[in-house]
Image (cartoon, rainbow, N blue to C red):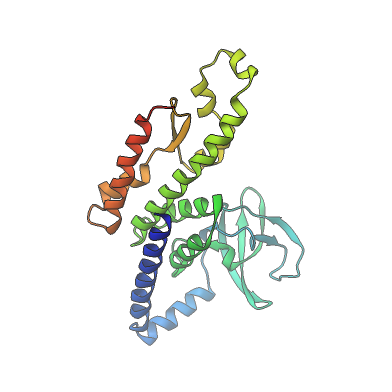
Amino acid sequence: MRRSFTLIFLVFLAFVFTTQAQKKRNTTVSTKQTSVTSANSITPNVAIVIDERLAVLRIQPSLYSDSIQRMRTGKIVAISGSKQADGVTFFRVIVPPRNYGWVQAEAVIGKNRKGDDERLAKLIQASEGFEQVERAVIYLENFPNSPLRPAILLLLGDLVEESAGKLSRDATRQLVNREVSASGAPLHSFYLNHSSLDRYRKLGINYWFNSSTKLYHYNGLTWDEIVKKFPKSNEAEEAKKRLDSLKMKMEAKGK
């Protein structure tokens, strides 16, 4: 199922990007000149870190400059300028609470910068693990009107449910001991307070827990959004299947 959806997602990406590229080619010369000018005189605007590998905050706009810190995915910064150096573009950024410096442009995205939604969508598809989940959440938070929203919603739900199996096994392995029994607290409360869920909660992602099977399951909010807001989309039928499957999983009895 995951491979077939990945193929659909890639085809959809190619279609959307080709359509947008055709629109760009049809714009007038004066429009192109205006966009170049605005890119060279960036006004202060919010941006979000999407690639920790490149997100080194530097004192000067140079790959050889001393670093101040490495910024984590999801960090919010304010762009106040740009400069070319060492074959890349650097943005001058203000980093709350008290830092400022220069960071490579590809490390961040801005919701108002043309092409950043396409770039982040491609990065999501090429990502793996929890980083893929983080980037998908960033996309949904910053590009609410994107034509790719139903596809990203479906992908995010699948990724989170896919991770539920490992989270369940890890929690069970840690919670089977005398200390848990001696606490007097119900077992399901230990599962739902487990530290492995913390980083998902920070992203607004929540799991349900089946006490009978001792398994976590994604609560299905992204699938529900597809069904309610995008009922005519290609992803709607798949989302309904996921929700039906979720209901069965939550009603399942342990062996």
Q: Position of residue 201 (x, y in %)?
A: 50, 38
Is 55 displayed left or right of 29 in the figure?
right
Note whether residue 74 is visible: no
Compared to residue 72, the image places residue 165 above or below, namely above
Q: Position of residue 101 (x, y in %)?
A: 67, 61
Is 98 displayed left or right of 125 in the figure?
right
Q: Position of residue 226 (x, y in %)?
A: 30, 50
Q: Quadrant of residue 213?
A: top left
Is 74 displayed left or right of 157 in the figure?
right
Q: Check the picture and name the quadrant holding the C terminus.
A: top left
Near-viewer residue (196 or 103)? 196
Q: Residue furthest left?
A: 232
Question: Residue, x 27% and y 48% (percent of image)?
Answer: 227
Near-viewer residue (137 or 253)? 253
Q: Residue furthest bottom?
A: 29
Q: Check the picture and name the quadrant holding the N terminus.
A: bottom left
Q: How many badges with numbers are in the image? A: 0
Compared to residue 17, the image places residue 134 above or below, namely above
Near-viewer residue (87 or 131)? 131
Question: Residue, x 33% and y 83% (percent of image)?
Answer: 26
Q: Quadrant of residue 8?
A: bottom left
